[in-house]
Image (tube, helix red, strand yellow):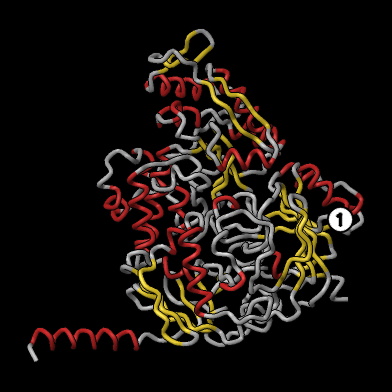
């Protein structure tokens, strides 16, 4: 046998041996190891003694016309509660389940064990033999492969992109499957795939999967559909034969017999339903309402309480998103100038009783934020190929949103904004800000859907008018708002970018060039910046926490410098009004409260 062939066989044997030495585990983490040991009894934020029974009635603003949240046609208008952090994985479940008390750690669920090598170029799952769908059919390797492939072929971004990176499906046993990747560059990819919804192959129509539907799907979760009233209400009923009710990751969860979610087109109607008890728990984001809106009989009689949940995650970034697909918003100087015109101190004092905190970047109040921190050597190295993409003050960590005198007409700030617009080719002619080249006035429309949004928009409109910028405020219902957002048919609107301690693959859908022109994508602003694409790649490829933090901070600096949105404000904690018919655990997980570990107080009596 020739030396070359022998060497090749030896190398193959070594590789196979290396794979076999990768141990099976009860969980995996993005960085480091899972906090909970093998054999843990329950998640730390669950009450193992929580009683079963009763109901919870929730409400949301909006509408729904689909039961498939994984496709483009159902992206924005699918029913709530099928697979969400706060409302639970009621219908669809995944191979592993995320702990909300750790940055990004997953534990065994549909898969009883998982193997992941250091290189992360493959991941292997061994299915739990007890796992079954609500129709009692077992969850099989065929179901796993079918689910990943159908999402790859017909799912919406970012799912189609994530699952499209699987290069080989290898069935390694009757209950085990190994998924191979081109390489281990995307360190987060195995974890994202571990969270994929698993469908029943025999009960899912592959031909019509990409079509919006109101046909109840078959899932493996703790609930099934009891009532579906399109656009108005959905009711989930607990499956008494739920296969995973005694698993450690499920002890203390899924306690209600029924979960109802009512839909309201108007926020005020939702609040009134809460006051009457038709909605039993409601999150509040408006400080004025939180401070003064609880003077009603049920609260005064002690039937309603106000809960404050402290989170350990970055503040969500609520901002006014510019649609950079519009010609007048393609110049960063224009966006930056208009951003300066938001008088936060005035709005906070006059509309919100001074209870909001100003948001500056996309990961405020965490180690991932660049605010107040000069760029590290690692960050500068990552940004070196992209000259001038980050503003000097942002790079130095000295940038902050425009500081005003709180009058709503700070002359110094107005002058600076006009100067920036002049640099961008505009001039103040009479009472209008006009593009000197085209002769067109700087005019655009702000889309709003709630009274709170409208009040903020009207305040900004008054300031805009002082320098000749015409901003119309258009109020639309929830359905029209979602349709226009889906089709990027807007100039500017309110948008929230949820922030976690482990941002990763979801950033492609929010910011990547590839997602910018895909209808229904989360790249609301239409960003097409090579530096963003590169930094997301670096983020998901990071092997150490230090490298990861550097990549996220660098991305934060690019997004801030790009002025893609006007940062608004955030509440210092989660505020939730609750009827005393409900109760919850004492410990709040890092990612905040979630309804799927609450229980009925009347069931405990």
- Is 266 above or below relative to 418? below
Question: Which residue is situated farthest in the top direction here?
Answer: 430
| Mark 1, other Cα within 10 Å: few <14 / some 14–19 / many ≥20 | some
Front-lying residue, 271 or 415? 271
- Is 67 above or below relative to 434? below
Front-lying residue, 500 or 397? 500
Give the x, y percent position of residue 166.
Answer: 39, 68
Question: Which residue is situated farthest in the left direction here?
Answer: 2
| Residue hosting label 1 | 277
Q: Residue at x 60, y 57 (%)?
A: 69
Kindly indicate the quadrant of the structure image that contains residue 438: top left
Q: Residue at x 84, y 76 (%)?
A: 604
How many labels were placed on the picture?
1
Give the x, y percent position of residue 329.
Answer: 45, 29
- Is 37 above or below relative to 328? below
Question: Which residue is situated farthest in the bottom direction here?
Answer: 1
- Is 347 above or below relative to 78? above
**In the figure, is residue 443 to the left or right of 370?**
right
Kindly indicate the quadrant of the structure image that contains residue 229: bottom right
**In the figure, is residue 396 to the left or right of 292?**
left
Q: In which quadrant will I find the N terminus? A: bottom left
**In the figure, is residue 104 to the left or right of 269?**
left
Q: In which quadrant will I find the C terminus? A: bottom right
Q: Is residue 593 visible?
A: no
Give the x, y percent position of residue 277.
Answer: 86, 55
Residue at disc 1, secondary structure: loop
Kindly indicate the quadrant of the structure image that contains residue 258: bottom right
Q: Residue at x 90, y 52 (%)?
A: 300
Q: Is residue 249 visible?
A: yes
């Amino acid at each position: 046998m020739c030396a070359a062939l022998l060497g090749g066989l030896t190398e193959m044997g070594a590789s196979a041996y290396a794979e076999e030495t990768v141990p099976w585990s009860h969980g995996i983490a993005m960085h480091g190891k899972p906090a909970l040991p093998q054999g843990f009894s329950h998640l730390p934020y669950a009450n193992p003694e929580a009683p079963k029974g009763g109901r919870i009635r929730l409400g949301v603003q909006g509408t729904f016309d689909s039961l498939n949240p994984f496709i483009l046609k159902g992206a924005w208008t699918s029913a709530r509660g099928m697979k969400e952090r706060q409302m639970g994985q009621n219908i669809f479940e995944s191979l592993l389940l995320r702990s909300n008390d750790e940055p990004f750690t997953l534990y065994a669920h549909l898969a009883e064990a998982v193997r992941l090598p250091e290189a992360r170029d493959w991941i292997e799952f061994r299915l739990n033999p007890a796992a079954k769908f609500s129709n009692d059919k077992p969850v099989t390797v065929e179901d796993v492969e079918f689910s990943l492939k159908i999402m790859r072929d017909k799912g919406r971004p970012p799912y189609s992109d994530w699952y499209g990176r699987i290069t080989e499906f290898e069935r390694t046993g009757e209950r085990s499957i190994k998924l191979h990747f081109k390489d281990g560059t995307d360190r987060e990819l195995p974890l994202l795939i571990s969270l994929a919804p698993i469908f029943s192959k025999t009960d899912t129509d592959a031909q019509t999967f990409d079509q919006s539907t109101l046909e109840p799907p078959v899932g493996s979760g703790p609930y099934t559909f009891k009532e579906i009233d399109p656009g108005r209400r959905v009711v989930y009923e607990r499956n008494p034969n739920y296969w995973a009710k005694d698993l450690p990751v499920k002890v203390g969860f899924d306690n209600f017999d029924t979960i109802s979610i009512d839909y309201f087109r108007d926020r005020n109607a939702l609040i009134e339903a809460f006051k009457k008890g038709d909605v039993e728990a409601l999150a509040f984001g408006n400080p004025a309402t939180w401070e003064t809106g609880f003077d009603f009989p049920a609260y005064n009689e002690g039937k309603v309480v106000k809960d404050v949940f402290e989170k350990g995650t970055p503040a969500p970034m609520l901002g006014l998103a510019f649609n950079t697909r519009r010609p007048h918003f393609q110049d960063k100087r224009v966006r930056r100038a208009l951003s300066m015109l938001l008088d936060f101190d005035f709005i906070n004092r006059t509309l919100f009783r001074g209870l909001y905190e100003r948001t500056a970047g996309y990961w405020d109040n965490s180690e991932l934020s660049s605010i107040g921190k000069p760029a590290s050597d690692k960050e500068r190295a990552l940004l070196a190929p992209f000259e001038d993409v980050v503003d000097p003050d942002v790079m130095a960590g000295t940038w902050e949103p425009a500081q005003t005198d709180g009058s709503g007409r700070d002359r110094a700030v107005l002058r600076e904004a006009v100067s920036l617009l002049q640099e961008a080719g505009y001039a103040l002619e009479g009472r209008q800000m006009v593009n000197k080249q085209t002769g067109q006035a700087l005019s655009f429309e702000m889309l709003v859907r709630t009274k709170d949004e409208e009040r903020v928009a009207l305040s900004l409109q008054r300031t805009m008018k002082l320098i000749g910028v015409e901003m119309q405020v258009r109020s639309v219902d929830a359905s029209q708002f979602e349709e226009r957002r889906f089709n990027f048919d807007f100039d500017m609107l309110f948008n929230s970018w949820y922030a976690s301690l482990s941002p990763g693959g979801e950033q492609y859908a929010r910011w990547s060039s590839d997602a910018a022109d895909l209808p229904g994508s989360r790249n609301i602003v239409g960003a097409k910046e090579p530096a963003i694409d590169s930094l997301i790649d670096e983020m998901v490829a990071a092997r150490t926490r230090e490298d990861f933090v550097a990549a996220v901070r660098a991305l934060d600096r690019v997004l801030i410098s790009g002025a893609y949105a006007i940062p608004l404000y955030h509440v210092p904690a989660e505020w939730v009004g609750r009827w005393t018919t409900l109760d919850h655990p004492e410990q709040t997980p890092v990612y905040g409260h979630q309804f799927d570990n609450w229980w009925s107080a009347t069931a405990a009596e």
